[in-house]
Image: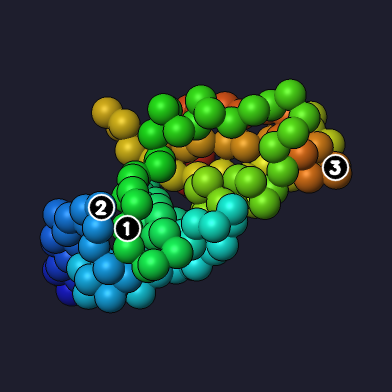
Amino acid sequence: MRLFVLALFSSLLLALAGCATVTPGMTRDEVLSTLGRPTAELERDGIHRLQFSRQPMGQSVVMVDLNSSGRVVQSQEVMNPSHFYTIDVSGTTTQADILWAFGPPATVDGVMAWNGKIWSYRWKDIENMWFWVYFDPSGVVRRVQQGPDLPLFRVLR
């Protein structure tokens, strides 16, 4: 019973956190008071990115981009097909690019049929889903795939 109450309370907190709104023009301090401490902060091409990841067990990753004056340019949930489809698998996308776009994965795996690492991300569609990014041995993306998070897979992991 105690475990059930803890799970219910955790779900409620996550749902309330998901209701927080970040809008363009907000300051960094306003973002932090709304979303809390980011899981990572990155710099790239003049953009300061705050990553708010719920991986490895959650299904959400929110990216908040700040301009040079520390104001929000955009805020977006990236665990969705419209972001997955932007990944170039022709040999130009690296692990650093995936970390910038999606943050750290829920798991890093490998299989006999693939000579490289596979990064796994949880996300939510109509059902619980996985999104996989396949890297070659040099750390370049060569394939992406998505599929359902079936309970049987969790038992076998």
From the image, tell me which residue sits under label 1.
72
Residue 110 appearing in the image: no
**Is residue 25 found left or right of 116 in the rendered image?**
left
From the image, tell me which residue sits under label 3.
137
Gap between marks 2 and 3 measured at Cα: 39 Å
Q: Residue at x 37, y 68 (%)?
A: 70
Tag 3 near tag 1, CB within 8 Å: no
Image quadrant assignment for residue 93: top right
Q: Judge the density around disc 2: few (<14), some (14-19), many (≥20) Cα neighbours within 10 Å.
A: few
Q: Which label's residue is closer to the chain start, 2 or 1?
A: 2
Gap between marks 2 and 1 measured at Cα: 5 Å
From the image, tell me which residue sits under label 2.
24
Using the image, determine if residue 63 lies above or below residue 37. above
Q: Which label's residue is closer to the chain start, 2 or 3?
A: 2
Q: Residue at x 23, y 62 (%)?
A: 26
- Name the colouring of the figure: rainbow
Using the image, determine if residue 118 lies above or below residue 83. below
